[in-house]
Image (cartoon, grey):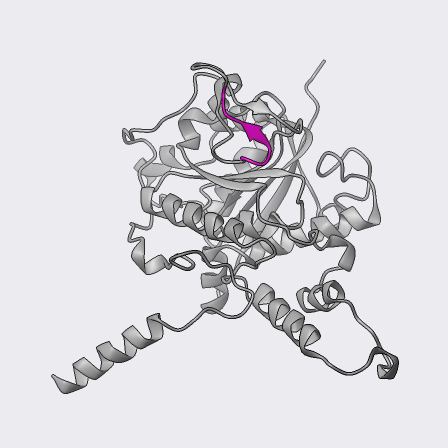
Amino acid sequence: MGRKKNQKAKGEATDRLPLFEGAATSEVGMPRKRHYRQRAHANPLSIHHLAYPPSPAEMDWSTHFPAFFEPPAAEGQGSKNLKGKKVEFADVGCGFGGLSISLAPLFPETLMLGLEIRVQVTQYVSDKIRALRLNPGSVDPDNAEDVAAAAAEGTAEGEDEPAAKRQKVETKDAKKSKVRGIKPELMPPEGYAYDNVSVLRANAMKFLPNFFEKGQLSKIFFLFPDPHFKARKHKARIISPTLLAEYAYVLRPGGLLYTITDVPDLHIWMTSHIGAFPLFQRLTDEDIDNIGLTSGEGVVGYEGSELQRERERAVMEAVKKRTEEGRKVERNQGGKEWSVWRRLPDPE
């Protein structure tokens, strides 16, 4: 009994440990995953009581992006767009939000949305984004590189050596970007507060066109989707000929569709179905490495530069390593297979 009591006391003490300096905190601190119990998957074909707008024009985005939208003037109307921005990135089945929260600082003027059907997981991501917003300039504590970058910033602020005696001077942003392995030009502006990222509980297999207009998205992600191994469950897979028509509808010509999985059979399934769809073209490894270098590719407002290519390379790194499932595969030394597809222009 004494041993168990000591173990419990130790656990409680650990819970009270403060977060690392620079981490986002709120009145109750950052959310902890263990308080958001949820099954690994949910059946998308089941009846879920979800709220969704009759059309994209009637969607109230002000609750998700208050810095970009005002509430609707009247019932049945959409929110008022303050800056002319629309959601451009959609992470379908976003899980614990690792991808969206990682990409948001890379594209501070691009709105991105995670779509998740599980209640508790959606709540976790929402609470995490709220905590990050409450502390402008904070970092994502689940991102090891952000943790190291925050430590680097703290070191820079703690230096008291006169500048004249330093052989090399680095700004805080340069130090942080060096730790993260990205260029200083790609760092978010000072005081960045994750205003451009949100999460929505939704069933993307049924209601995607209710939220997004034709050609609205520039990127759509399907990262480590439920494999639905049994043949009778294949109809519930997120990639199918019918659903690809909807993805092509909401994705603009030149936009990109990303997939990744650690299940070889599912990778074959996804690539064969997408490859057979006439509006998608698979990118080669060389093409992927050069995304953003040519005008007309990548994200609106960022295309056609060497800097954008670096930003797009960071996107691919996030696709491979920044999701909860991706980290799990890394820990287990498993394999991953991915693909990137360009949305082709509509036939004339």
Q: Is residue 69 magenta?
A: yes
- Residue at coordinates 47% horizontally, 35% vertically from top-left? 239
The answer, for residue 147, to whether it is visible in the render is yes
* Residue sitting nearer the eye, 153 or 325: 153
The answer, for residue 224, to whether it is visible in the render is no
Residue 136 coordinates in the image, percent (x, y): 58, 53
Q: How many circles with numbers are drawn on the protein?
A: 0
- Residue at coordinates 66% horizontally, 69% vertically from top-left? 153
Give the quadrant of residue 8: bottom left
Where is 206 relative to 161, above or below? Answer: above
Quarter of the image with the C terminus in it: top right
Where is 78 relative to 94, above or below? Answer: above
Quarter of the image with the N terminus in it: bottom left
Q: Is 254 on the left or on the right of 337, as rendered? A: right
Residue 258 coordinates in the image, percent (x, y): 59, 42
Q: Is 6 on the left or on the right of 42, as rendered? A: left
- Residue at coordinates 57% horizontally, 39% vertically from top-left? 112
Residue 347 coordinates in the image, percent (x, y): 69, 17
Query: Which stretch is magenta?
Result: 66-72
Q: Identify the main secondary structure in magenta.
A: loop
- Residue at coordinates 60% horizontally, 47% vertically from top-left? 104
* Residue sitting nearer the eye, 163 or 318: 163
Give the quadrant of residue 207: top left
Residue 183 coordinates in the image, percent (x, y): 76, 59
